[in-house]
Amino acid sequence: MDGHSGGVSVVIPTYNRADDLVGAIDSVLAQTYDPIEIVVIDDGSTDRTPEVIREYGSDISYHRFEENRGANAARNAGIKIADGEFIAFLDTDDRWRPEKIDRQVATLTEAGPTCGLVHTGIERQDTDGELIDRRIPSPTGNPSRRLLLGNFVGTYSCVLLRTQVFETVGTPDESLPSWQDWEFYLRVADEYRFALVPEPLT
C-alpha cells in the first residue's frame, strides 16, 4: 500500500462468481480514468475463476486464498497489495458507469485532504437490465450524524477512498457477519468529511 500519486487501485473480492466476475472486471477496464490497477482477491473459489482471470493476462493482479475467509478478509488483502493513492471496491455483482472513477477522483481532489471518501448514486437493475430503482443521496452534511440513522452511503462498490484513510481508521472488520460497510463508514466519518457525486454511476 504505497499510495502512488494519482493511481487508483480497484479491489475486487470474489467467491465462486466466475460469470459475474467478467462483467465486473470489464466495467473497470471501460473506465475513462487512468491509471487504474485491478486487484482480484479470490476467496477460495472452487469454480473456474482462475481460468477467467488468465484470459485477462497481465491486466489483473490475482491472489487466491486456499480457504474461504470472508469478503472483508479479501478486501483487506487487496488493501495491503494496493499501490494507488486511492482505493475503490467492486463486488462481482455490481457494475460501474465508465466515468465513475474519473468523477470521483476529481471530486475528492477538489474537496481537499480533510475529505476521505466520495460516493455515488446507485441504480439497481434486474438480471435483464431493467431499472428497478435509482437512489441518489442528498449532499452529505455531517456524515457521523447521518450514519447513526442508517447507511445513507450504500454498498462498498459506490465509494472511493484515499489510501491514507485505512492507515488512520484501520481496515474493514473481518469479524462482522453483516453491516460491514456501515461499520467501516462510521469509523471513517469520525476522522474525515465525505463527498458525493450526485449521479447513479454504480
Image: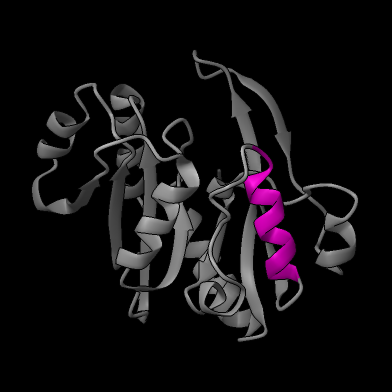
Q: Position of residue 33 (x, y in %)?
A: 37, 63
Q: Nearer the viewer, residue 33 or 93?
A: 93
Q: Position of residue 14 (x, y in %)?
A: 36, 36
163 with respect to 112 (left or right): left
- Can residue 55 be seen at all in this image of the molecule? yes
Residue at (20, 49) in percent of width and height: 62
- Can residue 32 be seen at all in this image of the molecule? no
Whether 149 is drawn above or below 22: the answer is: below
15 with respect to 116 (left or right): left
- Tell me where residue 196 sits by quadrant: bottom right
Whether 148 is drawn above or below 81: the answer is: above
Q: Quadrant of the C terminus?
A: top right
- Outermost residue on the top side: it is 128
**Does the magenta-highlighted stretch encompass residue 7?**
no
- Outermost residue on the bottom side: it is 113
**Does the magenta-highlighted stretch encompass residue 181?**
yes
- Tell me where residue 83 sits by quadrant: bottom left
Residue at (24, 38) in percent of width and height: 66
Please give the range of residues in magenta. 178-189
Residue at (83, 56) in percent of width and height: 147
Q: Position of residue 136 (x, y in %)?
A: 74, 46
Residue at (32, 32) in percent of width and height: 21
Q: Position of residue 18 (x, y in %)?
A: 28, 26
Q: Nearer the viewer, residue 167 or 3?
A: 167
Q: Nearer the viewer, residue 190 or 19?
A: 190
15 with respect to 119 (left or right): left
Which secondary structure dominates the residues rendered in magenta? Answer: helix
